[in-house]
Image (spheres, rainbow, N blue to C red):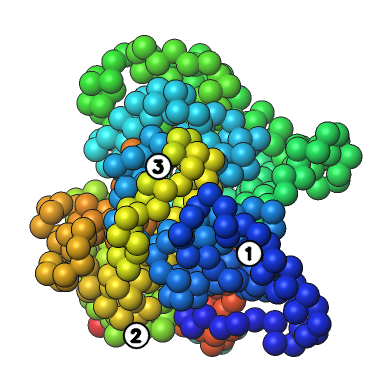
Amino acid sequence: IRCQSTGTNEPKTRRNLLDNASNLLTNLLSGGSLGSMPVAEGAVSDLFGRPLFFSLYDWFIEHGSVYKLAFGPKAFVVVSDPIIARHILRENAFSYDKGVLAEILEPIMGKGLIPADLDTWKQRRRVIAPGFHALYLEAMVNMFADCSERTIMKFEKLLEGEDSRGGNSIELDLEAEFSSLALDIIGLGVFNYDFGSVTKESPVIKAVYGTLFEAEHRSTFYIPYWKIPLARWIVPRQRKFQNDLKIINDCLDGLIRNAKETRQETDVEKLQSRDYSNLKDASLLRFLVDMRGADVDDRQLRDDLMTMLIAGHETTAAVLTWAVFLLAQNPSKVKKAQAEVDSVLGQKKPTFESLKKLEYIRLIVAESLRLYPQPPLLIRRTIKPDVLPGGYRGDKDGYPVPAGTDIFLSIYNLHRSPYFWDRPHEFEPERFLKPRKDVGIEGWSGFDPSRSPGALYPNEIVSDYAFLGFGGGPRKCVGDQFAVMESTVGLAMLLQKFDIELKGSPESVELVTGATIHTKNGLWCKLRERSAVH
Ligand code: HEM
């Protein structure tokens, strides 16, 4: 992706006015409490018409790994460096909260892990994280394969229909298909509810999409209009949102009631050694309800479920979407991936054991997440004064930041940083196999797979915070293994059966962003049955 300036056909006077307003604000704010930090002289017009993270990348190359950006009445510090990321996410994690993000998500997720205050977060993380134990994940892999099979069968049926009309390919928006697949999987994995969205529509599914849409909209809109008194009753879009929330909440309440009525109280160790292969309901909700000492009120449980539904749905769908987008432009990598699938799986479905051998597919998932991180920005706010380390190319003395400073940790910049990655914009899953040790960057210990032997993906430990596909430190994604396994199963089963081609040119696939990076008009692809074993 090349970052280009936008707005060439915009009337010049309007653009100049916007630029001047932006510069004025920038200058007003630049002498403030953030001292010597470089200031991005960005134009407000740069923030519209293309995803924000493109502009943040241009300014990163221009101003370095820490800079201040003023837009609207607000100033943000933009960070694009693994040394500082490590400081914020791990070394000094409890000096930060989720700031703007928590304000946006609180009406939807309540006190779920993402927006929760520190006390609630500590208590709930301790309860939820053990739920993702090995036997649960093993049961989940079988469910991922069953759900992916439903998607594959749907495609095969469509192809059969096309075949009877003399055609040999079908055209599909794979982004929409992955979204349905990921919704079905998260519903079953988290609360044993089969949305069945691959094959049908329902009011609950529509409500989930409506809620996601509003969450996305809020995360790109910097004025919290939903807090205006009576807005939820008067503004039609807010009324719809409240209705959608009610539909999902009623559904979740019913599932929680049912799980509590059939509760079998036991302790964590026993839960973790249950015979998951024969359990009718292996979901996380079952674990959370049955766990002894986890007497939790229904509202908190609902918040937890809602958080995982939203956190685990679009993210995974986006990883699959961009993996296909990248593969479709790299036929030799597709061949390599299909050869691995054929030798590991043949015509069988993936299992927990065979996943370990699908190394190249897992690297493709990681590389897609490097190029298209979901979300592209992590958001933090200082709750006490801190000093950000200078980072690479930064100020050696570091940058003092007062309490209340809003920070965008740009994972997109970090993952495409020319200082830490070779040919950063290229799709090269093999890059994760080679160590990069003596890179001569003070404070960064390089990329070394041996630091985390047997890791499912090249995590933050291996990369010393240069790869943060699932974040790092105490607030790291709780569903990372679940997500990598899910994406690997889905991708492997797709490549096992089909050859995929983009319908238009790669350039015609426009990006838009909210919480995740998605396409503007879908990822339209042509699918054919695989002709021969490669
Ligand atoms: C947090 C990415 C799938 C649940 C996070 C964070 C990232 C992330 C980067 C850290 C956010 C931050 O530090 O501000 C992803 C990606 C996924 C994925 C890329 C898919 C490919 C999932 C799934 C679940 C999940 C499947 C649940 C089943 C969560 C939760 C948090 C989180 C609950 C908040 C953790 C906390 O604050 O303690 N995710 N995630 N995610 N993720 Fe995921």
Amino acid at the residue labelled 3: Asp
Q: Position of residue 402 (x, y in %)?
A: 49, 42
Question: Disc 1 to disc 2, how far (Cα)?
Answer: 49 Å
> Is residue 91 placed above or below 229 in the rendered structure?
below
> Is residue 408 placed above or below 108 in the rendered structure?
below
Which residue occupies 36% across, 18% down?
291
Q: Which residue is mark 3?
A: 386
**Helix, strand or loop at mark 1:** helix
Q: Position of residue 218 (x, y in %)?
A: 67, 50
Question: Disc 2 to disc 3, how far (Cα)?
Answer: 48 Å
Q: Which residue is mark 1?
A: 27
Which residue occupies 30% across, 60% down?
396
Q: Earlier in the sequence, mark 2 or mark 3?
A: 2
Question: Disc 3 to disc 1, how far (Cα)?
Answer: 24 Å
For residue 397, side relative to residue 29 (left or right): left
Q: Which residue is mark 2?
A: 331
Q: Is mark 2 within 8 Å of ligand 1?
A: no
For residue 95, side relative to residue 26 (left or right): left
Amino acid at the residue labelled 2: Pro
Which residue occupies 47% across, 80% down?
1
Amino acid at the residue labelled 1: Asn
Point out the frontmost of discs 3 and 1: 1
